[in-house]
Amino acid sequence: MTKPIDIWLLVFPGFLLLDATGPAQVFSTANDEARDAGQPEPYRIRMTAPGGGPVASSSGVSLLTEPLPRRSLAGATLIVAGCRGLDGAGTVLAPATISWVRRAAGEVARCCSVCTGAFVLARAGLLDGRRAVTHWLDAARLQAQYPAIEVQDDAIYIKDGPVYTSAGIAAGMDLALSLVEEDRGRAAALGTAKRLVVFYKRPGGQRQFSSELLAQADPQGLHGQLTGWLRPRLKRQIDVEQMAAAFALSVRTLHRRLQREAGVSPAQLLLRLRMEAACGLLERPGMTVKRAASQSGFGSEYNLRRAFAAQLGVVPSEYQARFG
């Protein structure tokens, strides 16, 4: 009989309940699927926390946890749940806990985080030189605190070697389903998703849930000022030369300053703002894809479809059906 994979879910006081229970339910449902098919359960789910015992979530619901295991975790999967305060000065995280995470990461087959759990992996040095994601509200903070990480603000989850990170809260279930697919194959993951009544692979990235992320900037900085200048002009044909001239800058200086402030080029900023506008338009009752394309500056339905496919992984009509 194949030995079940140990899933260790690490939580801290005030953890976000769904960060831990969402992935736990995915693995539990995968066990249900296997058992109903006459197969052994593939997962053994365990909750752990520094010190063990009952740990209260931010919602007040407590989970009974085991102390941090001292034995070998070879072959296991570690998932760190998000918690308010993990992105601060480290008051929640004792040095001994970070040392344990660092040691465990060297033993487990997969080291994962959900939401702000990425800050724990970052403090342990596990994300340096890797691509990673966290909740869209915390992406800029993660990048600022840990510049060696390549933070992706739109991904639902990212695999970079044996390290996996996922976006906010419910994205932990998307990550867990991808792990089930790795372990058990597409049919098992799809069956698990069907039983849970969730997307097997969610269309689009987390930007579709956070259009304001695109506008977050210092309003007095170049990014904020250029954003304010572009918004009322999105329907026009605009090039980088016009943007630079509006701020009495050379094209090269505009590029350099914008990259330094926001990590985007002028053309990327314009595209993001047009995408944000198109998403907002498509969420309005009675809006057509053709009108949304025209009013957001894409000009044609074809251009809008190409942009949506590239940026969100869905077509405009699909986005409209879900969020309109």
Image: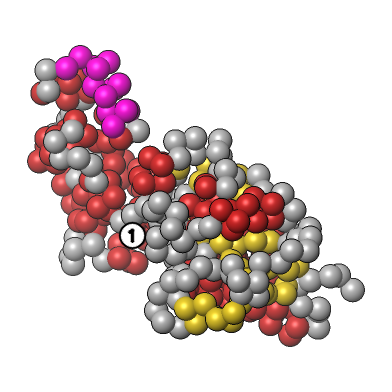
Q: Is residue 68 above or below residue 288?
A: below
Question: How many residues crowd mark 1 within 10 Å: few (<14), some (14–19), many (20+)?
Answer: few
The answer to whether one can see residue 258 in this image is yes
Quadrant the C terminus occupies = bottom left
Q: Which residue is painted at 65% across and 71% down in the image?
A: 67
Number of marks in the image?
A: 1
Q: Is residue 66 above or below residue 253?
A: below
Q: Nearer the viewer, residue 95 or 295?
A: 95
The answer to whether one can see residue 157 in this image is no
Query: Which quadrant holds residue 58?
Result: bottom left
Image: magenta residue range: 249-261
Q: Amino acid at mark 1?
A: Phe
The spot of residue 57 in percent (x, y) is 45, 76
Quadrant the N terminus occupies = bottom right
Magenta run includes residue 251:
yes
Which residue is identified by label 1? 209
The spot of residue 295 in percent (x, y) is 16, 47
Secondary structure beneath label 1 = helix
Q: Which residue is painted at 38% across and 40% down in the image?
A: 144
Magenta run includes residue 256:
yes
86 sits left or right of 28 in the view? left
The spot of residue 124 in percent (x, y) is 57, 47
Q: Is residue 208 above or below residue 297?
A: below
Query: Which quadrant holds residue 10?
Result: bottom right
Q: Nearer the viewer, residue 322 or 162?
A: 162
307 sits left or right of 191 in the view? left
